[in-house]
Amino acid sequence: MGLRNKDLLGLKQLTAEEIMEILETAKTMKMVLTSGNKKTSHLQGKSVITLFYENSTRTRLSFELASKYMGSASANISATGSSVAKGESLLDTARTIDMMATDIIIMRHSHSGAPHFIAPHLNASVVNAGDGMNEHPTQALLDMFTIYEKLGTLEGKKVAICGDIYHSRVVRSNAIGMTKLGAQVSIYGPKTMMPVGIEKLGCRVADNVADCVKDCDAVMGLRVQLERQHKSLFPSVAEYSKFYGISPEMLELAKPGALLMHPGPCNHGVELPTAVYDCDQSVINEQVTNGVAVRMAVLYLLMARRNQI
Amino acid sequence: MKIILENATLFTGEKKDIYIEDGKFCDVFDKKDADKTYDISGKTVFPGLVDMHCHLREPGFEYRETILTGSMSAAKGGYTSICPMPNTDPVCDNAAVVSGILKKAKEAGYARVYPIGACSKDLDGKLLSEIGLMKEAGIVAVSDDGKPIATAELLRKVLEYSSDFDIPVLDHCEEKTLSDGCMNEGEVSTCLGLRGIPTAAEDIAIARDIIMAEYLNIPIHLCHVSTKSGVRMVRDAKARGVKVTCETCPHYFTLTDDSCENYDSNFKMHPPLRTKEHVEAIIEGLKDGTIDAIATDHAPHHEDEKCVEFQIANNGIVGFETAFALGYTYLVKPGHITAQRLAELMCYNPSNILKLGRGGLNVGDDADLAVFDLENEFIFDKNKMLTKGRNTPYDGFKLYGETILTIMGGKVTYEKLC
Ligand SMILES: [Zn+2]
Ligand SMILES: [Zn+2]
């Protein structure tokens, strides 16, 4: 067992078995995380670099804590104020980091395929922390972990995802990953934010929010970027939340006790009313904890593979 | 200079010896008098190919290509006549730049270079460039390629004004407001999370151009057609008598958008690679005469402009050194078209559209020809190209139709060392 590839680029590249191994490992990591003493030594003497070309607070912090809890030497590079801002090419920057005996590079980039582009040129393992509109594998893994932990399996479970599908790397990773584990994923959003041929990823495109969430075991809202209205993708926040938001009435159409999820950060009152965000079914806060556990699992498994070679 | 090609087989199947003297095909002379004699038995002679759409990058972008390296690359592909687009720096929008290009081309001496002038000054889509003066200097057509002719109003004026000078207008068909993407829009772009360019962006522009050509009854030529609807619209327009011609490029009948799956920018160009359905429609258009020409859209780029993230990589691939072999391997070999039709697509039709008078193989005609090996497979190696660009998607492809010899005006411009 273990991971087949040097890098974690996306759910596209993982088999169902690999996904399950990550989720199982994350269970152990969560125990470590919630115990009094968080420290493990799995990454002792190893170096982990986060290379973020896009702003992010939670994903970056989640990765940083994950690697620190496991005892790695780590450093952070942001696109502003480094050689990145001086116009050095992505490949040059990545190669430079690689030459400093780095074990794992965690990269977020606004261009889809950026980690896929650099990974074959590097000795270090590359973890995709979000690339453009393509994938956000650790987010999807933590979403899957949350469902797995709460419901015991993804096999046969129905998951609804509503919102800006076009620009969402979270949707792509979740649709691919959850389908691999046997879940049925329904998606819905304004047609202006629905990419052509998304069914190819294995999900069903619903007719409206009600159709999407009906009888679901888990319902996920997506962050809608408010700037998108300037590109005429939707006319106003009021209209968006009325026709595309997940209201309490809509949530009632899901299975009783269905999980309410959101990858965060949430625009309160837009994709979810505050009453929904804070409802009993909401696992949004727990998702954050699970994120650290899943990232610890990913780092652990990638390092285990490196140590074998 | 006297050259004899012994045991030649023409693309028509005719077998004969070919005699060349003083740059022209000539009558039989004593074999002892030949300066050079080539035995080309088993190989096939085509008229020197004509590329009506390429980018030579000079002046301004010599780090990508020069007129010399571009011409040498063309010669290696069997081309004897090439037509560079005007998106250089400075833009080829005035007679001085045209003359400069012609002077460099003559010094290089590897191909007949027929410059294409800009429709609009500085390619800005606003004011007409000096089409009459550029014609006197040597342009054979006008185009704003790299960009579409910006507005319907400019299109109308360019068509009207150019027709006074009998200068063809070539349009790069793209509705800009729909083309903010980096590959074909479809399942593959969605799966890769890349912004797509819908076929509608090309089709709307093609429709506009056909409507204007029909309304004005003035010819128009459409560059690099890549879509099924585009082919259908051209077919229908031709049937009604609209004076429309069009070209496609080898990548539109050999590759599909799923080749982008590794984010390799050697598969990024405009228009983008489409799906199988469109590839099939392009082949159909090549078969039934809807598509008049195969052009390369040879677009060399520097490594630094291509070895980057897919989204920010420059559009375009090099094409001179693969075009004929791709045409032969993907169109003639499977039986879609004959070798004669390939000669029409790659020589006679582009020559006629631009009124170049090329392709003659009779005594007295300029001795422009290319000899290809149609029998033996070869592996295309990007590192052996003569262009400065290395941006080809065809590295390692097994193809038929390797160039053996190219002669332009009686001068050997390429010879494969055996
Ligand atoms: Zn073009
Ligand atoms: Zn072009």
Image (cartoon, coloured by chain):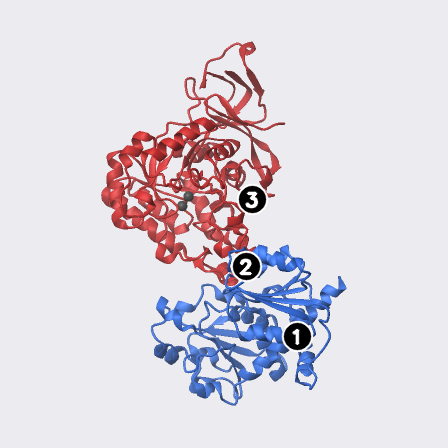
Chain colours: A blue, B red
Q: Of B121 and A144, which appears nearest the observer?
A: B121
Pointer 1 and pointer 2 on the same chain? yes
Label 3, residues with CA under 10 Å away: few <14, some 14-19, many ≥20: many
- Label 3: state its secondary structure: loop
Q: x, y percentage for residue A81?
A: 52, 64
Q: Of A21 and B330, which appears nearest the observer?
A: A21
Between the residue at mark 1 and the residue at mark 2, the CA separation in whole angstroms equals 25 Å
Q: Which residue is mark 3?
A: B394
Q: Is residue B351 visible?
A: no
> Of label 1 and label 2, which has the lower sequence position?
1
- Disc 3: host chain: B
> Residue extending furthest front?
A81
Q: Is residue A96 above or below residue A28?
A: above
Relative to A78, B97 lies left or right: left
Where residue B149 is drawn, which disc sits there? none
- Disc 2: host chain: A
Pointer 1 and pointer 3 on the same chain? no
Foreground mark, 1 or 2, reads 2
Label 2, residues with CA under 10 Å away: few <14, some 14-19, many ≥20: some
Q: Is residue B261 above or below residue B80?
A: below
Question: The disc labelled 3 sits on which kind of residue?
Answer: Tyr
Where residue A83 is drawn, which disc sits there? 2
